[in-house]
Image (cartoon, grey):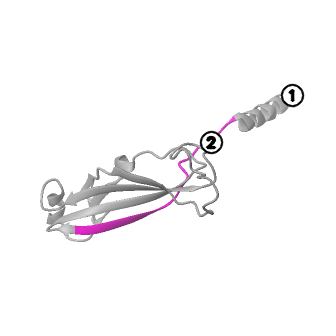
Amino acid sequence: MKNLTHLTILVLALFICSTAQATHVMGSDIFYKHISGMKYEITVKYYRDCRGVAFSNPSGASRIKCENGTTSMSLSLSLNAINDITPVCDTIGSPCDPQNTFGTGDGVEEHIYVDTVDFGVAPFNALLSYTGDIII
């Protein structure tokens, strides 16, 4: 019984002293725009809860691939802008200040990443030899 009491106290102490953090990504949108020929601009917007940890560049996890899933390539997303889109009155100060910083308020930030993909040149032209849709 004494060991059970000690174990219970230890578990409660660990639970109380531990902290958890997450990116707090609330959602995202993907857009593409035809530029010319086989060239497209890819825009990815992530929505971050300002109470969460800072958001890092998602290029490591961003891929473009064929529907069959056998061939995929990385996108090189570049940060275009971070906008505070908190739905509050103009008289209230920015709740996401400084931007992309842990625990800066109850606001929402929009992180915009952009890349240009040209299917007419390597490496993306390799995707054209496959049939089916292209997935971002």
Q: In which quarter of the image is the N terminus?
A: top right
Say which residue label 1 marks. Answer: 2
Along the line of sight, the residue nearer the viewer: 60 or 91: 91
Percent of width and height locating residue 102: 57, 43
User: Relative to residue 25, is residue 66 drawn left or right?
Assistant: left
In the current view of this chain or complex, which residue is farthest to the bottom? Answer: 132
- Identify the residue shown where x is 57% and y is 60%: 86
Give the residue type that dot 2 points to: Ala
Above or below for 50 versus 19: below
Left or right? Give the position of 13 relative to 77. right
Q: Element under label 2?
A: loop
Dot label at residue 25? none
Does the segment drawn in magenta span residue 21? yes
Front residue of this view, candidates 6 and 135: 135
Q: Image check: 44 left or right of 101?
A: left
Q: Which of 22 and 87 is in front in this view?
A: 87
Residue at 35% x, 67% y is 31
- Residue 28, horizontal then vertical, whole percent: 45, 62
The magenta span reads: 18-34
Residue 127, quarter of picture? bottom left
Would residue 69 be seen by someone viewing this image from the given angle? no
Residue 118 in the image: state x and y as whole percent. Answer: 18, 60
Residue at the front extreme of this rendering: 91
Question: Residue 80: where, in percent of width, then height?
Answer: 36, 53
List the single residue furthest toward the right.
1
Q: Which amino acid does label 1 sit on?
A: Lys
Quarter of the image with the C terminus is bottom left
| Residue underneath mark 2 | 20
| Badge nearest the viewer, 2 or 1 | 2
Are the residues at dot 2 and dot 1 in contact (C-beta closer than 8 Å)? Answer: no
Count every numbered label the image shows and give the total: 2
Q: Can residue 83 be seen in this view?
A: yes
